[in-house]
Amino acid sequence: MPGTTDILVDDRPPLGQVAITVDREAAARYGINVADITDLIQTGIGGGAVSQVFISDRRYDVTVRFEERVRNDPEALGHLVLTSTSGALIPLSEVARIKLQLGESTINRDMNRRYSW
């Protein structure tokens, strides 16, 4: 374009990400709620408070998260267990499809609209 200066191409390659898709029919067969599956994933991968510690008048959350090697390994995530309504331990791989895929490294916004390169 005429008059354009300081042009910059924002070229960022896609990043690997773990994609987990819940198999709702399988979860229903075992009596497992989708919320239980998402809680397991959210706490384990993103981290979450599981308890609290009280020191004097202050309260601190105890937060847990899976090790990085587990968070990035679909097979290891598939071995995580959920408890069915009958008390049986069901591996996550029985109620969800877990795979590695490429995803956008940056999601930008312009005038409240998301776009990626």
Image (tube, rainbow, N blue to C red):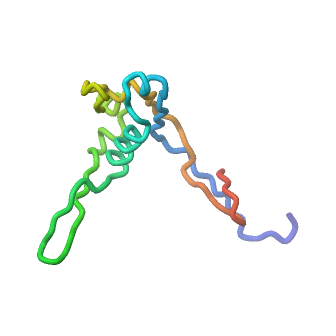
Task: Please tell me which residue is depicted at 53% across the width and 38% down the height of the picture.
Answer: 102
Task: Please tell me which residue is depicted at 41% across the width and 22% down the height of the picture.
Answer: 29
Q: In front: 76, or 4?
A: 76
How many marks the image carries: the answer is 0
Most extreme residue toward the front is 86
Task: Please tell me which residue is depicted at 45% across the width and 30% down the height of the picture.
Answer: 99
Q: In this view, does 13 lie above or below 53?
A: above
Most extreme residue toward the left is 56
Q: In front: 72, or 33?
A: 33
| Image quadrant where one finds the N terminus | bottom right
Say whether residue 80 is left or right of residue 29.
left
Say whether residue 99 is left or right of residue 91.
right
Q: Is residue 50 above or below residue 3?
A: above
Say whether residue 90 is left or right of residue 59.
right
Most extreme residue toward the bottom is 57
State which quadrant residue 93 falls in: top left
Q: Where is residue 70 in the image (x, y as percent from the top left)?
A: 30, 38
Q: Position of residue 14 (x, y in %)?
A: 55, 44
Say whether residue 91 is left or right of residue 12.
left
Q: In front: 53, or 99?
A: 53
Q: In this view, does 71 lie above or below 58?
A: above
Task: Please tell me which residue is depicted at 25% across the width and 56% down the height of the picture.
Answer: 63
Q: In this view, does 94 lie above or below 54?
A: above
Q: Position of residue 81 (x, y in %)?
A: 28, 31
